[in-house]
Amino acid sequence: MRKVTTALLAGAYLCLALTAALLIWRGGGGWGAGVAALIGGLGLALALHGQVSRIMERGRQSGDLADVRDAHVILANQLEKMHDRVAALAKTVATETFERSEILAEEIRRLDDAVQQMSDTLEERLSMPMVHHSPVHYAPAHHAPPPQSPAQLRVAEAMQHHSAQHALLLDTVREAMSDNRIDLYLQPIVGLPQRRTVFYESFSRLRDATGRVLMPAEYLTVAEPEGLMSTIDNLLLFRCAQIVRRLAKGDRKVAIFCNISLASLGDEQFFPQFLEFLSQNRDMAKGLVFELGQAAFERRGATEARNMAKLADLGFRFSLDKVTDLDLDFQDLARADVKYVKVTADTLIGQLTEEDGRLTLRGLKDIAAADFADLTRRYGVELIAEKIESERQVVDILELNIGYGQGNLFGEPRAIRDQVLAEAEPPADFVKRGLAQHGGR
């Protein structure tokens, strides 16, 4: 628009100059006066145009400033309205948050009351003397008890005797744990056929007040139902780690297989502390192999699998024992960093069968029996034949191309010396906390 206005003004100026020059020429001024008048008129027109342009520019700038002021006023009004809306929204959110906090606080108070009530009930039950139920049923007090045959009386006496023995054994186990009479035993695992010790497996043994050693078959019958195995397993894990650290200081490259239970892997109090300890001692990763049974491995949950992965991230390896089904998912084992699989010699030899003139394993008839160990190695898993008791079993195991063996034939479990255990003692209240968690006295 500004260019059109300028063009029109220029045309008007030119017309005025030409008109003035024509009038002077026709008035008798001649060509010279006409040209001079034209030039003078153009100059005067240009000067006038400059003034007009400046006046128009100032007017345009004044209009722009007015528009800016108007826009600023509108923006300020909108900001003020937005501020009011934000303040109102903040007030609403604060009110709702306070109400939700009140509801949450009330729920927490109710939960605390429920937990306290459960705790009081548990303490009351623990403070009561142990009552062992008998299968003998008594009639109400106002009726005479029905007569019992001699056979029924003998059964009742046997049940009462068993209950008394169970209570006595449970007290013995609790006292052994409370007095820290839990010993660590090691059994060698050898390489075949050289029979040189390459690993050790650790076992826990309990002693009563007289020094008699309680075998697992004996104390497991009462420790497992009472939930005490978690404390025993955790203590064994702690001591194994300490023994491995001691062996590492002596520059010994022998790894220790240490049993770890699903209860330990899922223990929210023990496992984070144990993981922190291992994180600070990653040099032990090559000297400690965590072992769990095949059934436990297959029923592990998300928490246990996640904690196994945390141990694997630190460089620790796993072993599977108590294997009864040789049709293993080797990809799953590889993903879980399982590097060893233990199968008893009797299980391996008992699975041998002959098909079409070749020796195979039942359930795995597609491959030769001697190729099974090579199959596991393709997935980074080594087979260990355990519970080898005779030389004849060694011959059969060697025919299966298995590289490791374990059993009393190569060495029975032996207790670690007291002075070594003294250096691997857990914190003073380690066992007491475990007993307290499971109602120990």
Image: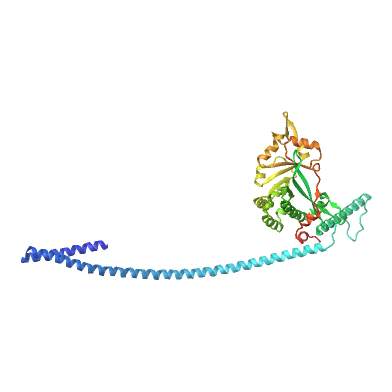
Q: Position of residue 400 (x, y in %)?
A: 73, 36
Residue drawn at x 65%, y 39% is 378
Q: Position of residue 302 (x, y in %)?
A: 66, 52
Q: In the rendered image of this protein, does residue 25 appear above or below residue 159?
A: below
User: Quadrant where the C terminus lies?
Assistant: bottom right
Q: In the rendered image of this protein, does residue 372 appear above or below residue 109?
A: above
- Can residue 133 be seen here? The reply is no
Left or right side of 216 for 371 = left
Q: Nearer the viewer, residue 413 or 64?
A: 413
Q: Position of residue 142 (x, y in %)?
A: 90, 61
Q: Which residue is at the far right? A: 150
The structure's colour scheme is rainbow
Q: Which residue is at the far left? A: 28
In which quadrant of the rendered view does residue 371 lie? top right
In which quadrant of the rendered view does residue 393 lie? top right
Left or right side of 157 for 259 = left
Left or right side of 305 for 45 = left
Q: Nearer the viewer, residue 238 or 14?
A: 238
Residue drawn at x 68%, y 67% is 109
Q: Position of residue 296 (x, y in %)?
A: 72, 48
Q: In the rendered image of this protein, does residue 90 appear above or below residue 290?
A: below
- Can residue 278 be seen here? The reply is yes
User: Quadrant where the N terminus lies?
Assistant: bottom left
Q: Which residue is at the far front? A: 250
Numbered marks: total: 0
